[in-house]
Image: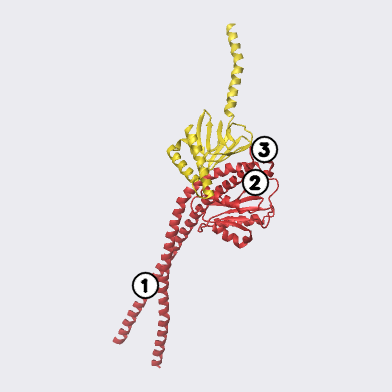
Chain colours: A yellow, B red
Amino acid sequence: MSALRLLSSAAKRTPSALALQRRGYAEVSDKIKLSLVLPHQAIFTSADVVQVNIAAATGDMGILANHVPSIEPLRPGVVEVIESGNISKKWFASGGFANVHPGNKLTINVVEGAPLESFSPEAVRANLQEALRVAAGNGSEESKLEARIEADVYEALQHALGSK
Amino acid sequence: MFARQSVARVATQQAYRHGAAPQNARNMATLREIELRLKSVRNIEKITKSMKMIASTKLAKAQRAMNAGKQYGIANSEILDHTPSETPAKRQLFIVVSSDKGLCGGIHSSVSKATRRAIADTENPVDADSPIMVIGDKSKAQLARVLGKNLALTFNQIGRDIPTFADAAGVADLIVKSGVEYDSIAIVHNGFVSAISYEPTIVQVANEHTFKESPGFRAYEMEDDVTKDLAEFSLANAIYAALVEAHACEQSARRNAMDNASKNAKDMIGSLTMQYNRGRQAAITNELVDIITGAFSCLCLRLVDLD
């Protein structure tokens, strides 16, 4: 009799365990197909990832699976990709576009980028100083503007390295 | 009577000698000519061989760049695939991608022909005065002959080495600044099929206007209106992808062209060497015959004298 009760309780427990398992499985499959590409290197090509954090022009945002289609211009900043198993990788991107497409696809075209750990803070500081000097100097309007943009990128890079 | 005969014989002999001497001289001349040709063909073979080697090494690099560039282009064209235009474009801007250098088979004429076909196409008619912009001097020269009035802008000095994004951005910038009016953009470039073949492909790129017209585009959310930026950026991206692919095609075509040229030169060297040796042999035989005949006639004369 007690054995029977045990069995029935075990039988009662199984559906809930099954449901839990199914939910777990569904979570794992909730992935977005990411293509993160540079002109000279394809970092991700239609790879399944869990979450992508980008520095969009309108603010930082995280993109999960089944995001609404949208077009986001990027400002210089960190692109963080979280793969399954909470493995996260960070890249610094100088600018580009991140587009979420219908069909659970995310494409990020970046003009130039590199892993965050490959930057040297000293070089960033030196180049930032140089860019600021040119921006404040008396060159042509165009070169000053270019230097201003350059300085913005270095500042963003310095900020990203500081908060690593 | 006898004297007359001998005179006649002398005359014929002289005639014979007169005939023989130029023939002999011509023979020597041809031998020297063959020798000279052989030398120049050998030099050409050396040149084409080294050009082939250079193209082979460049091809490996170009192919690597193309693989990354292609992925970049695919990611870029994703949005274009989702926003097809409803109305066919009347006035198209053709951007023809080739390069400045020759000696690479039919790379340049392939894109020129594709452009001419696209303009003369009756199924998807475009304006006869659609503007054309050409990257590379070779296709420019070909298109200037037939569609000279359509040429709006030409670029050169691009594609000597592996194209960079800065090249593509510069081209896109000049196109946007040029103020040429168009409804949509078609990039004509050579698509890489395999290491030995390529075919012209046409890539459609939307501009700001076509983006806004397309119903697919309304599905996308945007905070600010960034359509213009997006259109310019995707144009630069598409040009970059086309440039690297065309560059890889050009290197592979050059490698094949130089490979064939070296083979032909080798064949030519073989047949010329054969001809040269035969000619030399013939000349030697001729000289031997002359000597022997001379010696024999001397002997005969002496025998007659002894008689």
Q: Which numbered disc, 2 or 3, marks the residue that appears first in the sequence?
A: 2
In the image, what residue type sits under mark 3? Ala
Q: Which numbered disc, 3 or 1, marks the residue that appears first in the sequence?
A: 3
Label 2 residue SS:
helix
Q: Does residue A132 appear anywhere in the picture?
A: yes
Q: Which residue is mark 3?
A: B219
Eye-nearest disc, 1 or 2: 2
User: In the depicted view, which residue is nearer to us: B185 or A132?
Assistant: A132
Label 3 residue SS:
helix
- Residue B70 higher or lower than B133, as above or below: above
Residue at the left extreme of this rendering: B306
Label 1 residue SS:
helix
In the image, what residue type sits under mark 1? Ile
**Marks 1 and 3: in contact by CB < 8 Å?**
no
Residue A99 location, quadrant = top right
Confirm whether circles 3 and 1 share one chain: yes
Callout 2: 10 Å neighbours few (<14), some, many (20+)? Answer: some
Label 2 resides on the chain identified as B
Percent x, y of residue A14: 60, 16
Q: Which residue is mark 1?
A: B284
Q: Distance from label 2 to label 3 (Cα)?
A: 16 Å
Eye-nearest disc, 3 or 1: 3
Percent x, y of residue B243: 54, 50
Q: Quadrant of the N terminus of chain B?
A: bottom left
Q: Which residue is mark 2?
A: B208
Eye-nearest disc, 2 or 3: 2
Q: Quadrant of the C terminus of chain B?
A: bottom left
